[in-house]
Amino acid sequence: MVGQDQYNPTVCVTIHTEDPAAQVVQFCIHRLCRHEEYTDKLRQEALECENLSFGAMNREMPYLDSFMKETSRLSPGPIGK
């Protein structure tokens, strides 16, 4: 049991959908939680691109693009089936 003055770092995310884009996002969140070594590089890339337009972000974030593509490739099919 966590006391009032203690911090509980547990995060619970529930996404139930058959939309492939939402499933990739769910798998990315799961992969980031299990493999924290990706977090710093993804965060740095995002901070470098924070003032760009959405279209420019898509071109200027190759690490995020490859992370999402690889996560999609390694992930199983639809969740909950």
Image: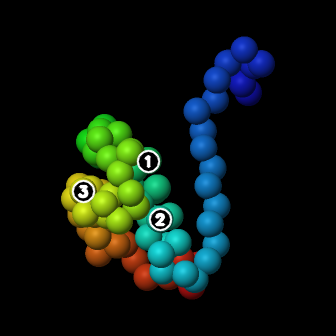
Q: Earlier in the sequence, mark 2 or mark 1?
A: 2
Is 62 on the left or on the right of 81, as rendered?
left
Q: Is residue 31 left or right of residue 79?
A: left
Residue wearing tag 3 = 60
- Element carrying mark 3: helix
- The answer to whether residue 25 is above or below residue 60 is below
* Residue placed under numbered mark 2 in the picture: 25
Secondary structure beneath dot 1 equals: helix
Q: Of callouts 3 and 1, which one flags the residue occurring earlier in the amino acid sequence? A: 1
- Could you tell me which secondary element the residue under label 2 belongs to? helix
Task: Give me the C-alpha separation between circle 3 and circle 1.
Answer: 24 Å
Query: Label 2 amino acid?
Result: Val
Is 69 positioned to the left or the right of 19 in the image?
left
Where is residue 3 shown, x and y percent of the image? 75, 19
Q: Residue 36: image x %, image y %?
A: 35, 42
Q: Position of residue 37 (x, y in %)?
A: 28, 41
Do labels 2 and 1 touch, CB within 8 Å?
Answer: no
Give the residue displayed 40% in from the left and 77% down from the top. 76
The residue pinned by badge 1 equals: 33
The answer for how far apart the CA atoms under marks 3 and 2 are is 19 Å
What residue appears at the point 47 percent right and 75 percent down from the top-left corner?
A: 21
